[in-house]
Amino acid sequence: MTFQGSLRELHLPDVIQLVAVSGKTGAFQLVKGREEGLIYLEAGRIVHATLGDLSGEEAVYALATWGEGSFRFLPGEVPPERTVTKNNTNLLMEAARRMDEWRVLNKKIPSLDHVPRFQVPEGKQGQINLNTQEWLVLSKIDGKTGISEIARRVNLPAFEVAKLLYGLVTMGLITLEEPALEPAGPSGENAAMSAVENGVAVDSDDLRKELHGLLRKLREEAQIAMGEVGWSVILRAYRRAKSDLESGRGTEAVQTMCQEILSQAAHLEGPESQRHLAERFRDVLAEWNAKVS
C-alpha cells in the first residue's frame, strides 16, 4: 500500500519520522501547486533533498514550512547524490523549529512568491538603523521580484530573507503584494509551439518555464495511466528530462521522456496500455498546441 496524504493533515517531520523508523530506502515526492520537492532516505536516514534551486538541508527546511500540498513515498528510489550530513534527529528538530517560526512569519509574509515594495512610513522621522543583511536585501527590491528570487540573488536561504523582510514590514518600510500574473506574449507562445514540434534547443527562461509545465502535465497523465507500477519509471524519466531541459536540450528532452515512458509502459503493462497512454500524450500535446497557437 502506498504511503501518501496531505500536508494539511500531517506535518512533514512527522511524515518522514514514520518512514524513517522502519529503516526504508526511497524518496518522498512533495507537490504544492507548481512546486515539487524530493527527499531521499537510505536505510531510514535522510541523505539528499531538492526543491527548485535548493538542495541538501536547506531544501528539507524549506519543504518543512509547507502547510499544504501532498506527499507520496516512492519505495526503492536511490538518491542521485548525497547532500545531507546531519542526522535525522538534528535535521528534523531544526525543521520543526522553522515550522514554528514560519507560523509567526506567515502572519505578515503569506508566501515566498510575494513581491516586496518600498513604502514611506507614516508619522516616522529620524534615522533608520539597519544591519548589513537588511541593506543587502533592500538593495534588491525593485517592486517586481519575489522573495525567493531575491534570496537567490543575495545568496541567502529564502527563510532567512523572509525573517529579514518580516522586520522591515513591521517597521513599515516595505509592503508585500501578490505576484502579477503575466501571460506569455505571442512571440514566446509561437516559439514554444515551434520548439515542441521541431525539437529545437531552448535559450529563453520563459520558454523553459512553459516546457517545464508541459513535462509536469505529461508526467501526471503517465501516473494516472500506469498507476503505482509505473511510479519509479515515470519519476526517473521525468527527473532526467528536467535535467536535460536545463542543460539546453530543449524539447528533445520532452520527446525523449515520452518515448522512454511509452517504452516502459509496453514492457510493464502491455501494448494496450501503451496505446492508451500514447493517446493521452497526444491529447496533452494537442491541448498545448491550442493553448499557444
Image (spheres, rainbow, N blue to C red):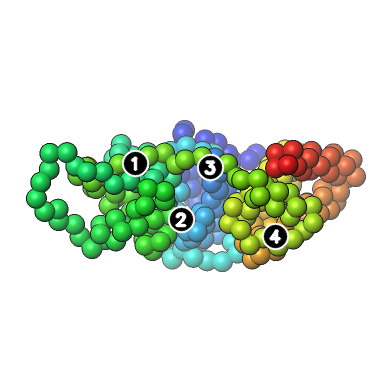
Residue at point 77%, 58% (across, down)? 199
Work out whether residue 75 or residue 214 is closer to the camera in this orientation and state it. 214
- The disc labelled 3 sits on which kind of residue? Glu
* Residue 149 quadrant: bottom left
Residue at point 33%, 46% (across, down)? 117
Numbered circle sitting on residue 176: 1
Badge 4 is on which residue? 250
- The disc labelled 4 sits on which kind of residue? Gly
Residue at point 78%, 40% (across, down)? 286
Identify the element where label 1 is drawn. Answer: strand
Q: Nearer the viewer, mark 4 or mark 2?
A: 4
Q: CA distance from mark 3 to mark 1?
A: 18 Å
Q: CA distance from mark 1 to mark 2?
A: 24 Å
Q: Nearer the viewer, mark 3 or mark 1?
A: 3
Disc 1 and disc 2 in contact, CB within 8 angstroms: no
Q: Nearer the viewer, mark 4 or mark 3?
A: 3
Q: CA distance from mark 4 to mark 3?
A: 22 Å
The first of marks 1 and 4 along the sequence is 1
Q: CA distance from mark 4 to mark 2?
A: 26 Å
- The disc labelled 1 sits on which kind of residue? Leu
Numbered circle sitting on residue 59: 2
Whole-percent x and y of residue 238? Answer: 68, 53
Disc 1 and disc 4 in contact, CB within 8 angstroms: no
